Amino acid sequence: MQQSTDIHRRIAQISSHINPPINQQQQVEEGNLWRSDCRAKGGSPGFKVAILGAAGGIGQPLAMLMKMNPLVAVLHLYDVVNSPGVTADISHMDTGAVVRGFLGQNQLEDALTGMDLVIIPAGVPRKPGMTRDDLFNINAGIVKTISEGIAKCCPKAIVNLISNPVNSTVPIAAEVFKKAGTYDPRRLLGVTMLDVVRANTFVAEVLGLDPREVSIPVVGGHAGVTILPLLSQVKPACSFTKEETEYLTSRIQNGGTEVVEAKAGAGSATLSMAYAAVKFADACLRGLRGDAGVVECAFVPSQVTELPFFASRVRLGRSGVEEIYPLGPLNEYERVGLEKAKKELGGSIEKGVSFAKK
Amino acid sequence: MTAAILRSALRRSAAASYSSSRGFASSPGQQRKVAILGAAGGIGQPLSLLMKLNPMVSLLSLYDIAGTPGVAADVSHINTRSEVKGYAGEDQLGQALEGSDVVIIPAGVPRKPGMTRDDLFKINAGIVKSLCEAISKYCPNALVNMISNPVNSTVPIAAEVFKMKGVYDERRLFGVTTLDVVRAKTFYAGKANVNVADVNVPVIGGHAGITILPLFSQATPSANLSAEEITALTKRTQDGGTEVVEAKAGKGSATLSMAYAGAIFADACLKGLNGVPDVVECSFVQSTVTELPFFASKVRLGKNGVEEVLGLGPMTDFEKQGLEALKPELKSSIEKGIAFAHAN
């Protein structure tokens, strides 16, 4: 059956140049080449992306990488200081995206109007000895203000929230959107990609493989023990000794702290965070474009556990999160880890919700 | 190239990921060590990120006088094939350099508003001299990509240091002028209303003010720009760096676009080393295309660095005038560098 369809398709492709179709539309059925042109429907094939906090430690390399991404047509760089300098710098790069800078809170609305995707690295980073929760007081206020702007100016945008503590800031954003009547649980995502990136790197090191060949889901949240790597679900399938499991789980959970310590007061992960954020934003854009099979881990409003938010593998599409996958089979170690994660995560979510409701 | 590097880093599976669409020689299995001297600085950090994403790199060595353990820990978490090592302090410079195939040097201080690149000379000349002494000792065969300003002087300084140590190979020393090319392409695409991805503009001369000479008459795709427009584009390309220094209002000079350009040029060097044919980039190299000892023009890159210095091509009267006007300034910057290397 398969063979005859293949043969018919090959004949159609070969004969198409002998009898060229009268209109372009006909060719869509035959080849994949024209599909992306069709979807653009005459508009620019790229998306409008805003980075809030573009002049910061994460924001700058993030802006550079997004400027290099061919899926971006317009790039808005917003911050409370220094965004004109970053904008001038990046605007010289010879790639297609048009860059505009916005400075100060009174330009926030202009930065957000018309955006398809909003990436939020804004906020202060940890110093040695701090947990992500210690940032709560400052960053919660920043995220609340930004969310109010999004609800007003681009309520349908996909939101990628990086500002820590993500376990609390995502619930804060949700409450703000609910209050404004614009809440769409498919369009709010806490970025946990850096935990996935770290998991892939550390596991590949242990297995002696190229990191690009390794894939591990990381579920739960984005802080300490709420980060739960599911080593039992690693691809390619491998088993780990007890020591390896404990070493890897601990290293993945404390990856952020590892960098904070190494930077000795100069900040937290910026370059790897920028990379992970772009990797995730790119997946969101491919989903928006209509690509199939775009699956990444993200911290989203969820029913896979009894908690209102949880990170797990999600399928991204034209409306943001189209499908949330269940956690899959967990081994004993992971089941214990899951209970620990849920306890702390529940508390962080509550803290965010209470803050937003004040 | 850059979209390809980004794509390959973003894709998950190894099978799909390798950058060159021509498939061959950017072989992922090849061992290439790239060292970045000044890796914790404004240019060094995003440059380290981009080089970590480059699939041709197997070992990334990050050196600076301080801050590198943090940058190395950060970048090492990225899930690409290269191993990252951080080195801090002069006593670790040798280890950082040992066995490098390409050494990129963004080290030094940046301009503040009102300064020319030459005002940086005193500090940066000393830095470049000691780094080059170490290169001659630990990796004399490496391709050296000089970013530290003023490039018009630091490249001649490097050449003199290598000569004095008996390791000079004029094919392996490059002043990175790629950012001027990037700017010329961007500004031209904007004015000519064409897709910047299709644009090519050669930029010759040097890497400061009027020594930067974009040859818009040779730009492709061609566009009917008036003489005024060409003059404006030329000036804007020449002052592109100053534009960013002013916009940053004391907070530094171009870092992200410089990292981007530096990564493009280093990538071209790696492709050349790996045997990819027809790798052509503009660069400030030892040259006989004019009577000056160093000059930027298109060069073809290969297994030994510069395989061929290409000629300047046909020029309009405006460009010929620009060429004559830049030579005295470029000459004196070159001589200043040579004099410094011998006096210190």
Image (spheres, coloured by chain):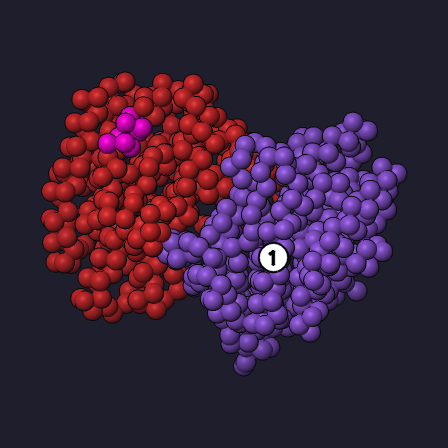
Chain colours: A purple, B red
Q: Position of residue B341 (x, y in %)?
A: 21, 25
Q: Is residue B249 above or below residue B66?
A: below
Which residue is the extreme one toward the bottom?
A: A22
Can residue B34 be seen? no
Instruction: Work out whether residue A130 can be spotted.
Output: yes
Q: Residue furthest front?
A: A358
In front of the other: B166 or A217:
A217
Q: Is residue B280 magenta?
A: no
- Mark 1: which amino acid? Gly
Label 1 sits on a secondary structure element that is: helix
Q: Is residue B203 left or right of residue B92?
A: left
* A156, above or below A143, in the image: below
- A297 over A335 or under it: above or below: below
Q: Position of residue B175 (x, y in %)?
A: 29, 38
Q: Position of residue B320 (x, y in %)?
A: 13, 53
B127 falls in the magenta region: yes
Which of the 4 image quadrants contains residue B93? top left
Residue where numbered disc 1 is placed: A141
Q: Which residue: 38% across, 61% down?
A: B196
Q: Residues within 10 Å of mark 1 (few under 14, many from 20)?
A: some
Q: Label 1 is found on which chain of the structure?
A: A
Task: Please name the residue shown 25% across and 53% down the image.
Answer: B239
Report the magenta stretch's main SS: helix
Q: Which residues are magenta?
A: B122-129
